[in-house]
Image: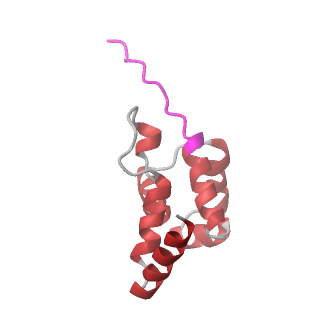
Amino acid sequence: MAKRPVPKYDFKAFGAAIKAAREGRKESRKKVGDEMFISPRYLANIENKGQHPSLQIFFELIQRYHISVDQFLLDTPAAKDTKRRQLDALLDGMSDTGIRIVTAKNNVHI
């Protein structure tokens, strides 16, 4: 029986999102590699060449950088895109005073 052809998923957009998030945090590839037990070259290939990460590394990267994979894998819009997930993570780590400051600053610009 012939094998069913399976199209390969293009991971270049995912890699670009990981790179942007990593650079936004001002993290080096070496730092991330050391913390995730992967080589900086492997991370560079994921970011720049669209190399397919292992499932474990894929999962760790989306958690680390709060990346919504819905935008890359689904044809329908995500309930929460990457920017919203990253903002939620920032707000989750913020004190009540910090949230009041952000809210007050936002109200001034409205």
Q: Is residue 108 above or below residue 98?
A: above
Q: In the displayed orientation, state which residue is furthest to the top.
A: 1
Residue 62 seen: no
Task: Examine the residues drawn in magenta and state their main secondary structure.
Answer: loop
Q: Disc count in the image?
A: 0
Coloring applied to the structure: secondary structure
In the displayed structure image, the side of residue 55 where residue 49 appears, left or right = right
In the displayed structure image, the side of residue 110 where residue 50 appears, left or right = right
Give how far across and how far down residue 16 sits, in percent.
Answer: 62, 48
The residue depicted at 58 percent of the width and 60 percent of the height is 21
Q: Which residues are magenta?
A: 1-13
Residue 20 seen: yes
Q: Nearer the viewer, residue 27 or 82?
A: 82
The residue depicted at 41 percent of the width and 56 percent of the height is 59
Q: Nearer the viewer, residue 109 or 58?
A: 109
Q: Quadrant of the N terminus?
A: top left
Using the rendered view, name the quadrant where residue 13 is placed: top right
Give how far across and how far down residue 84 sits, in percent.
Answer: 45, 58
Does residue 72 belong to the magenta stretch?
Answer: no
Q: Is residue 91 above or below residue 60?
A: below
Using the rendered view, name the quadrant where residue 97 is placed: bottom left
Give how far across and how far down residue 42 sits, in percent.
Answer: 62, 55
Does residue 4 belong to the magenta stretch?
Answer: yes
The residue depicted at 60 percent of the width and 41 percent of the height is 12
Give how far across and how far down residue 44 sits, in percent.
Answer: 66, 54
The residue depicted at 53 percent of the width and 43 percent of the height is 52
Q: Nearer the viewer, residue 71 or 18?
A: 71
In the displayed structure image, the side of residue 92 where residue 27 appears, left or right = right
